[in-house]
Amino acid sequence: MKEKALEALYAQIKGCRCQCPGEREGAGATRDYGNPDAGVVMLGEAPGKEEIKQGIPFAGQAGFKLNEYLQLAGLQRSDLYIINTVKCRPTKNNGRSNRKPNRCEISSCARWLEEELKILSPRVIITLGDIALKQFAGNSMRISDYHGRPLVRQQTLVFPLYHPAAVIYRRALDKVMAEDFVKLGRWLAQIKPS
Ligand code: URA
């Protein structure tokens, strides 16, 4: 049921031609093969080059890190469903590099995200990084203040985490991430409906 609705949504996103500044590619080109019925959604930022190539979120370097951290939480990718805040790959240098999504891209993709969340109707959203946290929990939220601290937003439980790519650039975050993922695993076990 959800699969069909998601397929239809991704087909619609593929037709999206946003007029925002900046170059980009691959709107709607990625979709997760995790569990849309898990009630747990992980929200990233935007796909990168490898994700567009493979058609799957978190298929590149950040994805390898994410898989390692998920193990610390006792989770596999099939225990959740991964989506992105922005539905295309924001690029620069004629597609050679990724860039951060701009405000226009984030707000123009908000309607797709809203539709996707309506279909998935998760009980829990795990946000990865600043952009995902702000989009879902408000612009004043800073990941450095809220990582590893569950919140409630619009009747949904939100668990904010740093983005796994941040660890690639800031090695010191590795320990913090590992601790937060262990916390996430314990918290999910506690809130599981009996
Ligand atoms: N980073 C993200 O935020 N999402 C992806 O799908 C890949 C890398």
Image (spheres, helix red, strand yellow):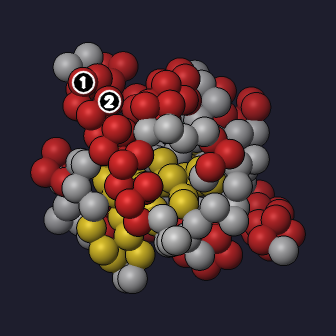
Q: Is residue 81 above or below residue 61?
A: below
Say if mark 1 contacts mark 2, CB within 8 Å: yes
SS for tag 1? helix
**Position of residue 43 in the picture relative to residue 141 (left or right):** right
Would you identify the image quadrant in which residue 55 lies? Answer: top right
The residue under the point 41% across, 75% down is 156
**Could you tell me which quadrant the N terminus lies in?**
bottom right
Circle 1 is placed at which residue position?
175
Name the amino acid type tagged 1: Lys
- How far apart are the alpha carbons under marks 1 and 2? 5 Å
Would you identify the image quadrant in which residue 177 lies? Answer: top left
- Can residue 131 be seen here? no
Q: Which residue is more in the foreground, 194 or 138?
A: 194
Q: Which residue is more in the foreground, 80 or 64?
A: 80
Q: Where is residue 133 shown, x and y percent of the image?
A: 33, 58
Q: Is residue 30 above or below residue 169?
A: below
Q: Where is residue 111 shown, x and y percent of the image?
A: 56, 74
Circle 2 is placed at which residue position?
178
Q: Where is residue 192 shown, x and y percent of the image?
A: 48, 65
The residue under the point 17% across, 65% down is 140
Name the amino acid type tagged 2: Ala
The residue under the point 44% across, 39% down is 73
- Can residue 182 be seen here? yes
Q: Which mark is residue 85?
A: none
Q: Is residue 120 above or below residue 99?
A: below
